[in-house]
Image (cartoon, rainbow, N blue to C red):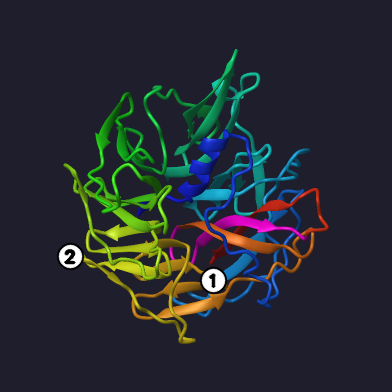
Amino acid sequence: MLKSKGRTARAESAQRQGSGGRRPKAWSRAGVLGAVSVGVIALGAAFSVPASAAPVAAASGAAAASFKIFNPPSPSDPLFGSPEQLTSIYAASPTDVWAVGQPAGDQFEHWNGTSWTGQGIPAGPATAAGNTASVSFITGTSASNITAVGTSSVVEPGTDTLESVAFHFNGTAWSQMTIPANVQLGPVLAFSATNLWSVNDNGDAEQFNGTTWAKTKLPIDTGLPKGSSQLIMSSISGSSPSDIWAAGTASTVGVRPAQAVPVLEHFNGTSWSNVSVPAPTGLRGGGLFDVESISPTDAYAVATGAILHWNGTAWTALNATTQTGAAVTGSAVAASSPTDVWIAGGTTLDNFNGTSWTSVPVPATTGLTPAGQTVEGLDAAAAVGPGTVWFVGNTLTPASDTSNSELPYALGTSNG
């Protein structure tokens, strides 16, 4: 299962404001940890964080994995404090994990099995004088083939142009890729170094063959009034080059009442098709945040207030409950196999072992520095092998703490 994880709504906001600016939330889970009393200890945000946090046993199909929470290193910014939001994550192995986001200085965060360390954008056009860049999505096939994409603000005399940027990691170092001016990148998915897909908010699917990019218009049919809607693609995932799902949200602009509808596209190896999903409930509807393709007959999508499941024929509302009787809902999904599916909710992490769902509380932020942090959202997830899953997002610090109003947040569980 290969996928790009992240919230495109945030990337869209960054594109409209200019890279390097503070991205507002399209949705958030502020304060979800406040009432959860699971004792987990982690070190503060100003250092590389060792894996010495006290574990929390998870009585689930993930073989009682242990959870740890972290604030990966985050440099301070004089204007915004530390406006880092981790929006996407890729795990090559339990001891080789990369997360990306929009920080003041470290666009890349790396976990080596012991600690998190931060890295900035590599030298290149994105770091030229006056230019800034954010990285929103990451994907890979191995520790030596990882691609991350985002947006760069290119400053020239009298102009400030927003352009897509991409970076490649070869196992040793990051380098900036050359992206044609007409290519706009969003969520990204890699099957190999010569087969890379991205979908964007213009409704395009773009494929990279290792040398050139080919653009295909997605056959999106939202049912919304023409000329009065905007598109935000949030996720792409595929079990193979002939089984790719791309998910997002279309919403009305300047129309009252506002409406939002899910967008789901499928690639069968030859062409893209528009696929219907159950309409979200509620007056204004809603869209899709995340999608995870496990096989051609097994996929999950996270929708507004619901989890959807694909059985190879149709998408249906999951309507599942955990051992507590609570409905399975969330903001991000990851799976290492059909019998190890994880969904990040507001206050719980729900795991499917192939038979039933079990939830465990999201660990409390006890021990994080500064104290009193609340998780605003778990925005992305990545699973690699049974019992190893990571969730990333950001926390908000107490109002009294003006130096670090927003910090990166990582929640990890590993069997070894």
Check disc 1 and give the amino acid type.
Ala
Q: Residues within 10 Å of mark 2 (few under 14, many from 20)?
A: few
Q: Which residues are magenta?
A: 383-398
Q: Contact, CB < 8 Å: mark 2 with mark 1? A: no
Residue farthest front in this picture: 256
Relative horizontal placement of residue 194, taking residue 365 as reference (left or right): left
Task: State the residue in front, 106 or 340.
Answer: 106
Identify residue for label 1.
65
Identify residue for label 2.
313
Residue at the spot x=58%, y=49% of the render? 86
Residue 62 showing in the rendered view: no
Residue at the spot x=69%, y=55% of the render? 71
| Tally of numbered tags | 2
**Is label 2 in a helix, a strand or a loop?**
loop
Relative horizontal placement of residue 262, taking residue 173 as reference (left or right): left
Check disc 2 and give the amino acid type.
Thr
